[in-house]
């Protein structure tokens, strides 16, 4: 701050604003600009969700109305495991890269360090995709006699390999998560088109169409992401791989994967249990209901993603915060969760009263799952706060314990409560995870 003397004119006298006032105004303008940027990103993420998953939802609704439960169940199961492959391949790299870019911006680190991390991380992601591909090929050759599965797995693998070099983390770290959401919708739209075309083909051709649509969708998504990055001056920079960087990528990736994957495994176990105990029709309705609730949870995730760079900056100047402090710093997500939970329950209840047949049963399932939107939001908020602190292993432990409890609950109750066993399991997963995370943060 410049020095002033007693003889100098006061700010009021010479018409100039004081440095304190000017600093306050600049800070307020930055806050307004950042908030506006967050709202724009959230809007674009929601638009991407509406375009992408909205397209899949419409085609699934047509399948339910037409009574095509077998195709819907086949698609839901295979697509769900393919998305699990996408999550495993990414292995949390989107978070570590976003964190690195955010720290580069706030701490003035050189961009070359981000590119080094990207190259080391992408090498591990490519290796992970290849391992999944080998496992899928072994399954097709040794265990699968179903034509749909053989074609789907064979043609969906290139999509996993392409995702190993995705640009989501870079876009999120640059506070361009809205662009990430819009480009990500392309993969969902292509899959929706594939599902619509599969309605008119044979069992085997449906698998080929849907597997091919999966890979084409992710090819177009990755191309769109890198086009957006290039337009902002972020052209790929290749660096030689380092052992330390790869070890770090494996360590952080494994920790983050164990944060993300357990919850995904719960869903897949429930699909298998549903198919084995409840039949194709109930499985199809379960997939349909979870698609809607997943959309709500993804919107909550969008709000969290937009705030993640700012959350990293805030927590970097604070010690280990409490769980209440983490949740209090993300009030927008909590408010959205309350609105979504109450809204989904109300709308599904009304739909159950005015519809019949398959849509009536689907509405009942949706209404029963809707309250878990709130508990899932609390888990997401805690998870993001711990990720911002770099407490990947602690968050992974909490989520793994919660997932294990949910799987056991699903297995024990499925024959007693039918599809509603999965509602109870969802609540067990979320509450157990929150408790374990709370215990860690209190230490």
Image: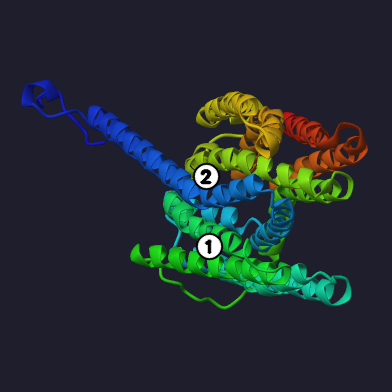
| Residue 124 in view | no
What's the mark number on residue 368? none
For the image, the number of numbered tags is: 2
Q: Earlier in the sequence, mark 2 or mark 1?
A: 1
Which quadrant of the figure contains the N terminus?
A: top left
| Residue 414 in view | yes
Q: Nearer the viewer, residue 139 or 408?
A: 139
Which quadrant of the figure contains the C terminus?
A: top right
Locate residue 40, reporting x and y percent.
38, 42
Locate residue 237, reporting x and y percent.
46, 74
What's the mark number on residue 190? 1
Q: Nearer the viewer, residue 186 or 2?
A: 186
Q: Up-down: is 253 above or below 353?
A: below
Per the image, label 1 sits on a secondary structure element best described as helix
Q: Nearer the viewer, residue 175 or 351?
A: 351
State which quadrant residue 333 falls in: top right
Locate residue 354, reporting x and y percent.
60, 26
Q: Up-down: is 329 above or below 71?
A: above
Can you name the residue that lies furthest to the top here?
12
State which quadrant residue 182 falls in: bottom left
Q: Residue at x 58, y 27 (%)?
A: 347
Q: Which residue is mark 2?
A: 305
Q: Residue at x 72, y 50 (%)?
A: 69
Q: Nearer the viewer, mark 2 or mark 1?
A: 1
Locate residue 124, reporting x and y percent.
67, 69
Per the image, label 2 sits on a secondary structure element best described as helix
């Amino acid at each position: 701050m410049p020095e002033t003397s007693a003889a100098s004119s006061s700010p009021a006298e010479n018409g100039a604003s004081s440095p304190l006032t000017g600093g306050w105004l600049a800070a307020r303008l930055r806050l307004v600009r950042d908030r506006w940027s967050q709202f724009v990103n959230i809007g674009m993420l929601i638009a991407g969700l509406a375009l992408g998953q909205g397209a899949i939802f419409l085609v699934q609704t047509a399948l339910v109305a037409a009574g095509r439960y077998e195709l819907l169940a086949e698609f839901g199961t295979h697509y769900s495991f393919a998305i699990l492959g996408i999550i495993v391949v990414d292995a949390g790299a989107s978070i570590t890269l976003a964190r690195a870019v955010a720290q580069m911006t706030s701490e003035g680190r050189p961009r070359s360090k981000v590119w080094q991390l990207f190259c080391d991380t992408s090498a591990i992601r490519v290796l992970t995709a290849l391992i999944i591909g080998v496992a899928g090929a072994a399954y097709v050759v040794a265990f699968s006699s179903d034509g749909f599965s053989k074609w789907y797995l064979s043609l969906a693998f290139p999509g996993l390999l392409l995702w190993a070099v995705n640009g989501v983390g870079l876009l999120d770290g640059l506070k361009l998560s809205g662009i990430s959401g819009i480009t990500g919708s392309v993969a969902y739209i292509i899959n929706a088109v594939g599902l619509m075309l599969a309605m008119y083909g044979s069992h085997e051709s449906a698998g080929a169409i849907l597997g091919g649509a999966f890979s084409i969708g992710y090819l177009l998504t990755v191309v769109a992401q890198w086009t957006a990055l290039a337009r902002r001056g972020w052209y790929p920079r290749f660096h030689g791989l380092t052992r330390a960087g790869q070890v770090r990528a494996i360590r952080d990736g494994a920790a983050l994967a164990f944060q993300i994957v357990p919850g995904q495994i719960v869903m897949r176990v429930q699909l298998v249990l549903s198919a084995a105990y409840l039949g194709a029709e109930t499985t199809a309705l379960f997939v349909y209901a979870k698609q809607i609730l997943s959309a709500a949870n993804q919107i909550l995730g969008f709000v969290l993603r937009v705030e993640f760079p700012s959350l990293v900056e805030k927590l970097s100047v604070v010690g280990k915060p409490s769980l209440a402090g983490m949740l209090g710093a993300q009030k927008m997500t909590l408010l959205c969760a309350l609105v979504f939970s109450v809204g989904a329950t109300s709308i599904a209840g009304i739909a159950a009263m005015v519809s019949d047949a398959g849509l009536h049963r689907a509405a009942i399932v949706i209404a029963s799952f809707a309250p878990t939107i709130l508990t899932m939001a609390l888990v997401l908020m805690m998870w993001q706060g711990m990720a911002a602190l770099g407490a990947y292993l602690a968050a992974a432990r909490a989520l793994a314990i919660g997932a294990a409890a949910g799987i056991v609950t699903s297995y024990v109750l499925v024959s007693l409560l039918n599809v509603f066993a999965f509602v109870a399991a969802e609540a067990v997963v979320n509450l157990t995870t929150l408790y374990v995370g709370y215990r860690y943060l209190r230490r």
